[in-house]
Amino acid sequence: MRIGILGAGPAGLYLAYLLKRRRPGWEVQVVEQNRLGSTFGFGVVFSERALEFLSGSDPETAAAIAPHLESWNDIAINHRGERIFIDGIGFAAIGRLTLLRLLAERARSAGAVLDFERHVERLDELEPADLVVGADGIRSLVRQAHAAFGTQVTLLRNRFAWFGTTKRFDTLSQSFVATEHGVFNAHHYRYAPDRSTFIVEVDEETFFASGFDRLPEDEARLVCERAFAETLDGHPLIANNSAWRQFPVIRNQRWSVGKCVLLGDALHTAHFSIGSGTRLAMEDAIALDCALAGHEGDLPSALAAYETARRPILEKLVGAANASGAWYERFREHMRLPPLDFAMSYVTRSGRVDRERLRRVSPGFVARYERGC
Ligand SMILES: Cc1cc2nc3c(=O)[nH]c(=O)nc-3n(C[C@H](O)[C@H](O)[C@H](O)COP(=O)(O)OP(=O)(O)OC[C@H]3O[C@@H](n4cnc5c(N)ncnc54)[C@H](O)[C@@H]3O)c2cc1C
């Protein structure tokens, strides 16, 4: 079998590794437009049970990633000058670049061919692969080449810009501030001992009132630094392709068409506020690899099995991500709540956690909420 994978993000690289690990005789090629070592974004978090999704099926990759993780057990909500801790909600974070380097190294050492700095304009450039994998992210060429995928893309109205900072945060934090231009939210957490991710999100009104539609990137960054001066404590925001964007919610009616299949962000997105896109992309790769193994020599059945097994799991998580995204779309309204009610609204936003479950997971926070102070 010859496999052509478009995109060396977490989905494409991890799939290449898995395929070669199981079947050294297959030809697996990954084509990527950027060079290794240049990517958008800073750190990403693995939500909930961190690398548990890997440790059973691939303890070696989990062990390679683990030393690079920063982890913590609480979330902090900063609102109206108060800091509320929500205990028991653990996350682990890693630099996106570090993760991609590790995955590339593993794919290459398993024997996959990684072809960096090659932008693919037409799908036939990936021919004559027997299977073409669209791991090419939100603007997927593979997806756009086939109307039969039945793609739906909806843009959320809020705008966000992905920065980094040298400020080290103790825990994953959410800061909400009101300024003369409107309301600002930052999702911030450290992903390396000396670096943190700092994603700034604003509603549409604030976006235009702040002039983010016309300000050069550097000046917009300074406006954000001023809005979060207290949180940043004198540290700068660092830009890396930190343009203002609207989050695209992507769905597909079909996951494969002929010999083309999608995975990761090309197939689905999950709002970044639940910190799951990278894990989902890697889990898609695991599911596709397993489906191919279960139907050797029968590609249509393998692709159908991939979708059948994975879709229900994915839809559950994507439902939670949508609910979370919808909460952020209205964060200006939620900010009218006093800090404790605001924190409760935040932690229950995805609809997955009711009061009883929260009492078990976050006893400290629930006790404080019920005390009311
Ligand atoms: C602000 C923000 C914060 C996030 N935070 C988190 C987080 O905390 N935790 C988390 O798990 N996820 C997070 N995510 C989501 C995560 O980044 C994505 O879900 C993940 O990167 C998807 O992996 P992927 O491999 O499917 O796609 P990508 O990582 O987008 O990789 C696709 C690759 O394909 C390449 N490509 C595309 N088209 C072509 C072409 N024509 N020719 C050659 N190469 C091409 C691109 O250059 C790219 O390298 C966040 C996303 C955003 C926007």
Image (cartoon, helix red, strand yellow):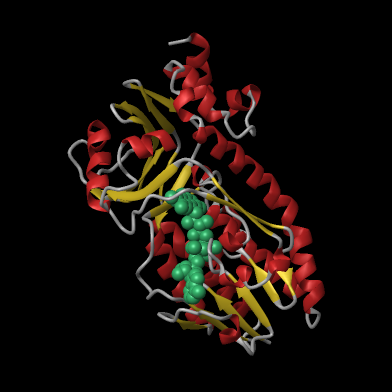
| Left or right: 132, with 273 as reference point | right
Q: So how many labels did they put on this image? A: 0
Q: In the rendered image, is residue 8 in sight?
A: no
Q: Is residue 370 above or below residue 167?
A: above
- Residue at x-position 33% and y-position 38%: 170
Q: Quadrant of the C terminus?
A: top left
Residue 117, percent from left and from top: 40, 80
- Residue at x-position 73% and y-position 55%: 311
Q: Quadrant of residue 98?
A: bottom left
- Residue at x-position 47% and y-position 43%: 91
Q: Quadrant of the N terminus?
A: bottom right
Toward the left, the furthest residue is 234
Residue 254, percent from left and from top: 74, 63
Q: Is residue 163 above or below residue 108?
A: above
Q: Quadrant of residue 99?
A: bottom left
Residue 264, percent from left and from top: 59, 61
Residue 223, percent from left and from top: 24, 40
Which of the pair 362/340 is nearer the observer?
340
Q: In the rendered image, is residue 72 in sight?
A: yes
